[in-house]
Amino acid sequence: KVIKSVKSCCKAQPLFYDQLAHIIAQTELINTGFVQKINNCIENEFINTYMIDKVQSRMSSPVMINNVRKYEIKT
């Protein structure tokens, strides 16, 4: 419920992640599996929200060839 509420309020997101980091840092015997699950969840959320398609990100700016927009793959 907390994560769902945080996602819908952009002002709450920084506070949520700051508090989560503080709790993790202050907990002496924290379960590493739990931390890894949190890490995976946050990483997936970041990727799904802010990252563009990997194929698209490897492409250069569009080039017009015969009035058709083409992309060249960066190597």
Image: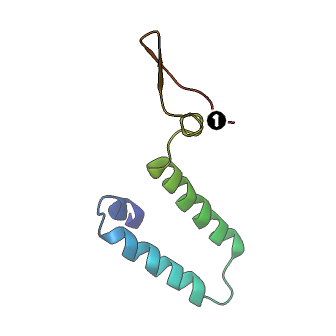
Q: Residue at x 55, y 40 (%)?
A: 57
Q: Residue at x 39, y 67 (%)?
A: 2
Q: Residue 68: percent from the left, percent from the top?
A: 44, 13
Which of 55 and 40 lies nearest the eye of the viewer? 55
Which of 4 and 74 lies nearest the eye of the viewer? 74
Q: Quadrant of residue 30?
A: bottom right
In-image side of 75 versus 43 (left or right): right
Q: Residue at x 30, y 58 (%)?
A: 8
Quadrant (top left, top right, bottom left, bottom right) of the N terminus: bottom left
Indicate whether 48 appears above or below 41: above
Q: Residues within 10 Å of mark 1 (few under 14, many from 20)?
A: few
In-image side of 18 versus 6 (left or right): right
Q: Residue 64: percent from the left, percent from the top?
A: 45, 19
Which amino acid type is shown beneath numbered disc 1? Lys
In-image side of 13 versus 62 (left or right): left
Indicate whether 2 appears above or below 70: below
Q: Quadrant of residue 24?
A: bottom right
Q: Residue 58: percent from the left, percent from the top?
A: 60, 38
For disc 1, the marked residue is 74
Q: Residue at x 46, y 9 (%)?
A: 66
